[in-house]
Image: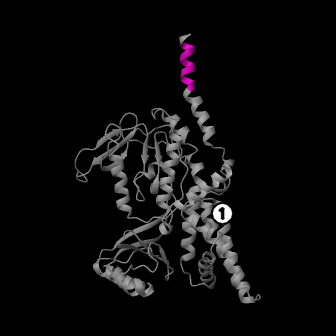
Amino acid sequence: MAAAAADNNKMKMKKKLAGRSFHNGRFVRRLREACGEVGEERLRLVEGTVRGFVDERGEPWEDDRGDRGGNNNNKNPICGVTYRPKGGEEDQGELVTVRAHLTIVCDGMYSSLRKNLVKDPKIELPSFFVGLLLKDEGKDRILPFPNHGHVVLADPSPILFYPISSTETRCLIDIKAKKLPRVSTGELAKYLTERVAPQVPDQLREPFLAAVKEGRVRSMQNKLMPAEVFTCDGALMLGDAFNMRHPLTGGGMTVALHDSKLLCDMLSHLKSFEHKRSTTLATKAFHTERKPWAATINTLANALYKVFCRTGEEWNEEMQSACFDYLSLGGMYSQGPISLLGGLNPRPFVLVAHFFMVALYGIGRLLKPFPTPKGLLIGCQLLMGAIAIILPIIKAEGIVRVFAPFLIGETRKGFGARQRTTAAAPSLDKKKKTR
């Protein structure tokens, strides 16, 4: 009976699972509004530009690592920040100092504070995203499959379409270039009209050209950065300031929300953050515990992007075709990758298994109805290409931390015990003095 009840609960949970696309700016604004409803006695919202950290004396914080390298900096704890309130001039007005037992750095992909905590972040700049807003002018839904995301395998890199409201569709064009075509001279509009528009599906081409003509084009630099392990008493990092992957799969918010929940769980047993060393010990396992989960999302995003970018080689075309046909098989062949994509089953071994199953599926098709020299050659190239795509990504994330985090020895239970021992030490000394 208990097993049957558990199965029924699982079925109900599966039925409740659904994907949602939304306007990111509105979502973040609503999160801030929700925080504001907590009340000023518990939470006070202040808008401003942070200029730097402060130490115990309220002076500008200085990095004490010197030239010895590494990302461990526990001799000089961070005790707050200085910021310029919103509305103040860039080079005028007084800086305001705010003290805090714990400072969480989450100032986004263009973080100005990251370099203070991570000495040499490994940032890659693979491409740009150019964004357009396609509007439904009261006609039929412009997407071929309403309420679904669409990926167009364009040349040389993919184009995304997904709804963000009942009347608006976001279009993101990936442009592989070191420098984006200039907007002011019309180069970008010309590129979108002449190079991209002919590759857009017929149903979307008219709204696409209308959005380009309207001129409301937004762009951003795509960045990749594996999370670096660091410790600094009084400070932690979250979000794109800490870890970035290609935005093709929209995994950034998924990782950020999961990291926030994990961090809350680790800090929940502390009565306060006043003892910075205890807080650091309580969260030291954060990097290890998040790694398998976050690395799966990161690896999937970066690997899919490389697969979907055309290289002009035949094995690459076969890999793209095999990827879509593999998903079309349905059952576990679609449920597995989709569960990885949505963060529902973020297991590194499952990701690697499906990735190479796609490669083997493509090789198998090349060898039908019987092997030929050309088929064998392209099959070998496809397998080597698949290895060349995924291995560097996993290596950058850290092979041991991704696949065998138990070997690191940093478990939440272990650090909880160490933290309690550290916290108990002062009381023992006090008893000795009393006696």
Q: Is residue 65 in sight in this rendering? A: no
Left or right: where 349 falls relative to 431: right
* The quarter of the displayed image where residue 201 is located: bottom left
Residue 285's place in the image compared with 18, above or below, is: above
The picture places residue 273, in percent across and down from the top left corner, at 46, 35
Residue beneath the point at 36% across and 43% down: 81
Q: Is residue 289 in sight in this rendering? A: yes
Q: Which residue is mark 1?
A: 350
238 vs 333, nearest the viewer: 333
Residue beneath the point at 56% across and 81% down: 311
Residue 88's place in the image compared with 348, above or below, is: above
The part of the chain drawn in magenta is: 424-433
**Circle 1: residue type:** Val
Specify the principal SS of the magenta part.
helix
137 vs 230, nearest the viewer: 137
Q: Quadrant of the C terminus?
A: top right
